[in-house]
Amino acid sequence: MRTEGDTWDITTSVGSTALFVAAARALESAKAEPLSSDPYAARFCRAAGGEWADVVDGVISGSHGQQLLDGDFGGYFVSFQGARTKFFDAYFTEAIEAGVRQVVLIAAGLDSRAYRLPWLDGTVIYEIDQPKVLEFKRTVMAQAGDAPRAERREVAVDLRDDWAKALQDSGFDPTVPTAWIAEGLLIYLPAAAQEQLFTGIDALSSPGSRIAVEEGRPMPQAVFDAKRREERDAGHEGTFFTLIYNEQIAPADEWFGARGWDAAPTRLAEYLDRVGRPVPADDPEAGPMVDSNSLVTAVKRG
């Protein structure tokens, strides 16, 4: 269970979810016709070792391996990560084409976009996350001899603290357009922290700035509590439901739309259909989760 002021490294608590996502991206990348390709995802998993290395080598071990490689949930999650990566890569491609040269990855985790997207000359990418998570990524990439394709600046701060000040202390310029992303983040924040995050993004964004977020409608509380009990009873505590908050301040398109942004939500179920990876609505595990999720982008008006 989450506690106030809790912290983590790459293999514990919320930090381990970055490896879960990286493993799914690696499995998607290995397909004959992947929706998206992340050449660094498997490297992160092998560097972490244990069940994470086993997963990318097709071995089922541990609770995460079972979820990713065995059963309907695994198939859904890998497709979901492939689709989500494809969607947000396209978002950044549009930002690059619009000339944006300042990027902020909020709760960057093992996002490798600083290393694999064709950034414009002069682009600065700020990665916000827990210190040990950022250290793991930097170490793994440096040991392999890979350099980012833009200037990469780490902002080691907890999002429940004054991240906006830490970002500006790292050189962030609020007077130029920024491309922000909060991918796979909001469910790990209580509603008050979501409000703080959105308010900070809005305050630091000049006209022409962009935001991309993934969000999900809260479950009925009784259903959420049951899911937590099931996770604990199955020995999977700390995998998903015991790490997240079942809260939402407001749909992102409505929140940003009311503050001068042109926002467009895309239902995850519709996007999966569009890219040829539909999930049956009657799937007892994947169906409800897919149906509740949306991918939202917005541009701030001048």
Image: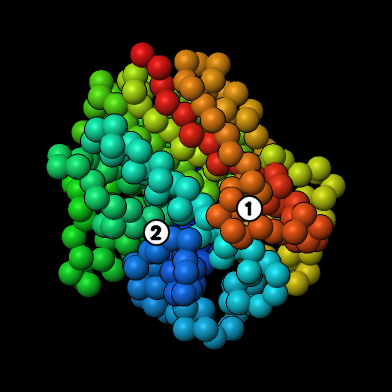
Residue 293's place in the image compared with 56, above or below, is above
- According to the picture, the residue beneath numbered tag 1 turns out to be 273
Amino acid type, callout 2 = Leu
What number is the disc on residue 55? none
Taking depth in this image into account, of 37 and 284 the one nearest to the observer is 37
Q: Quadrant of the N terminus?
A: bottom right
Q: From the viewer's perspective, tell me whether residue 78 is left or right of residue 10.
A: right
Give the residue displayed 64% in from the left and 28% down from the top: 250
Q: CA distance from mark 2 to mark 1?
A: 27 Å
| Disc nearest the viewer among 2 and 1 | 1
- Evaluate whether residue 259 shows in this view: yes
- The picture places residue 39, in percent across and down from the top left corner, at 34, 68
Q: Is residue 48 visible?
A: no
The residue that label 2 is drawn on is 110
- Residue 199: image location, x then y, percent: 47, 24
Amino acid carrying label 1: it is Asp
> The C terminus appears in which quarter of the rendering?
top left
